[in-house]
Image: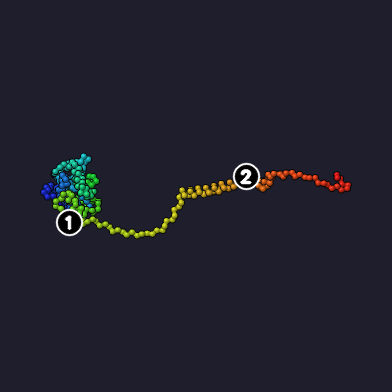
Amino acid sequence: MLVRIRPGAELTGAERELVDCLRAYPTPGLALVDCRVGDRRLGAVVVTPRGITVLEVKGFRRRQSGLLTATADGSWMISDSPLDLDAQPSNGLTDRVEHGVHAVRVALERALQDGRHVCGAVVLVPYRGVVVRPARTTLRPGLDVLVANSVDAHELRVYLEGFSAGPREWTIDRVLNTCTTLGVVDVPSRAVLSEEGFADGRPARPPAVPQVRKFSEPAPPADPTRRGKLVGIALFAAALLGILVVFVMVGAALLQDSPNSRPMSDTSQTTTTTRAPMSTTPRKTECWPFQPQC
């Protein structure tokens, strides 16, 4: 792994021990030791192809071994003894590393870069030959505690390989932009980053699979809905009702006519005026012999 130390940096014994561990690490990465973001000093910022992690490095004042635990009030214990660090007390370690992660994220976002895959960890560097367990524990999502030194750096290596589940998006261009954003003076060249294992350009997309058009038979006509059925029944009933009304009207007209009714010609003849009586003149009756009433 590439390691760049800020010029003029005064490293503690624990930070020098961490530098030896990182330089022996075989996976691609760039470690910026004693990085300054604004007015905040960070122990180390490690950039890998999968993301960025901020490390707060602390050493021990004396040889302590045992079981490492973190209490609810923020103080850390080894077995039954408080954690005795060489620089600062253990209280507030979680908050300090969380503030460092926030500072890096804000700096990246101000430079219009993605700051999602930024994690953080506290690296405790015990004296060589001292056993502190557990060697790794999780404080909060994205915040871990590691125990490592140059003799046993297994947990640190496992952490750097899987601290971020993001894709390999930190290419050479993004690494160079990150160095510029964080104010790194000794920026590695593109050739050095490429030799270290960072990809040049965006990761290649998988080839598109050609789509085969499938011709399917036309779907059968949909069954009439309930509403359509009701409309058809209503129209049929209206037609039947209209026919029934016609038959009723015809029957009523037939019933009103009398079976003995006379035609209009007969009626007109009966209503005509009677003839005036004709005057008759008596005719002279011829009488024969022996004719009565003559």
Circle 1 residues within 10 Å: few <14, some 14–19, many ≥20: some
Do we see residue 118 in this rendering?
Answer: no
Q: Residue at x 17, y 51 (%)?
A: 180
**Quadrant where the N terminus is found in the figure:** bottom left
Q: What residue is shown with label 2?
A: 256
User: In x, y percent, where is residue 81?
Assistant: 17, 41
Q: How many marks?
A: 2
| Label 2 residue SS | helix
Image position, residue 271 (x, y; %)? 68, 44
On screen, residue 195 above or below 63: below
Could you give the CA–CA distance between mark 2 and mark 1, rounded to whole angstroms?
115 Å
Element type at marker 1? helix
Which quarter shows the C terminus?
A: top right
Q: Is residue 102 visible?
A: yes
Residue 289, given in percent of the width and then of the height, sits at 88, 48
The residue labelled by disc 1 is 190
